[in-house]
Image: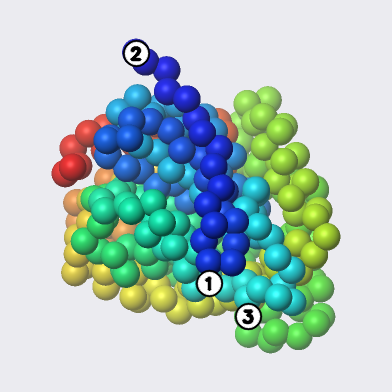
Amino acid sequence: MKTQKVSYVKANIEDLSIFYRESGPADGPVVLLLHGFPTSSHMYRNLIPLLNEKYHVIAPDLPGFGFSDSPKNTVFTYTFDNLTKYIQGLIDHLGLKRFTIQVFDYGAPVGYRIAVANPEKITGIISQNGNAYVEGLSEGWNPIQKYWNEPNEENRNNLRGMCTAATTRWQYLTGVNNPDLVAPESYTLDQYFLDREGNVELQLDLFKDYASNVAMYPVFQEYFRQKSPEFLAVWGDKDPFFLPPGARAFARDLPNAIIKFFDTGHFALETHVHEIGTEIIKFLEKLPR
């Protein structure tokens, strides 16, 4: 087996520099990996080597995250529509004609927007705790939903705790049977980026705009029904934010969806990358090229 190198690349997309990890044969089927909050493409560091023997893997950092540009929210509009615009710009910059998309957390509403806009390019969708149904939202969303409904300073300030080191570590460890399996550099790196000047403000803007994703759930569901993409859900069933009913709901609109649960939390790849990787490879092998 040939060991594939990983390249760490930046591309100028409109007015921002977008960082991405790239690996695998240039002529291999493309897999686009989209991360969530509060992480970056670093969350895929252990999955990429499992895929890159046969697949051309691209894992970008969203604007405001990781090593992509993170302009202050006073000069950049942090909405999920805008995040999607820059990932679409990267897709166009790289000339991607056909690809499978893997989505997680924030990457899900970005990825589903991309799928809706580019149905002819999507060979399949892999959702790792990437929600598209109201029943998938836990009570942990209640304070954020309160901010959607009443966008005042008090409700905004009540969410600042979501960006603290304690909460970041909690996100990684909740639902995990053996915390020793979670690499500490994961939540430590995430917190490093969260602690950058002005970053909390842009995260609060995105909390507020998450309402736009829930409003688009019917659009995403209609896409699933009309286009019937090949679909795999790989779900940490102890996720404190996105509940198992959200994974099962995909079967309503995609009767052939493959739905697999794993005994772990939100960041399922930290503890179950080999098990999840096996399911992903089985899924990818049957997709059209």
x and y, in percent, of residue 111 in the image: 41, 59
Circle 2 is placed at which residue position?
1
Image position, residue 276 (x, y; %): 41, 33
The residues bearing labels 1 and 3 have C-alpha atoms spaced at a distance of 18 Å
Q: Badges 1 and 3: C-beta atoms under 8 Å apart?
A: no
The crowding category of the residue bearing disc 2, from other C-alpha atoms within 10 Å (few below 14, some 14 to 19, many at least 20), is few
Query: Which residue does the image show at 54% across and 42% down from the upper left?
Result: 9
Residue 119 horizontal/vertical position (percent): 25, 63
Task: Report the front residue among 95 and 221.
Answer: 95
Local crowd size for mark 1, using a 10 Å CA cut-off: few (<14), some (14–19), many (≥20): some
Determine the image quadrant of residue 235. Answer: top left
| Marked residue nearer the N-terminal end (3 or 2) | 2
Quote the CA–CA distance across marks 2 and 1: 40 Å
**Circle 2 sits in a helix, a strand or a loop, which is it?**
loop
Residue under circle 3? 148
* Badge 2 amino acid: Met
Instruction: Give the residue type that dot 1 points to.
Output: Asn
Drawn side of residue 284 relative to residue 63, left or right: left
Name the mark on residue 82. 1
Q: Is residue 62 or residue 223 the one in the foreground?
A: 62
Marks 3 and 2: which is nearer the front?
Answer: 2
At 41% across and 56% down in the image, what residue appears?
A: 93
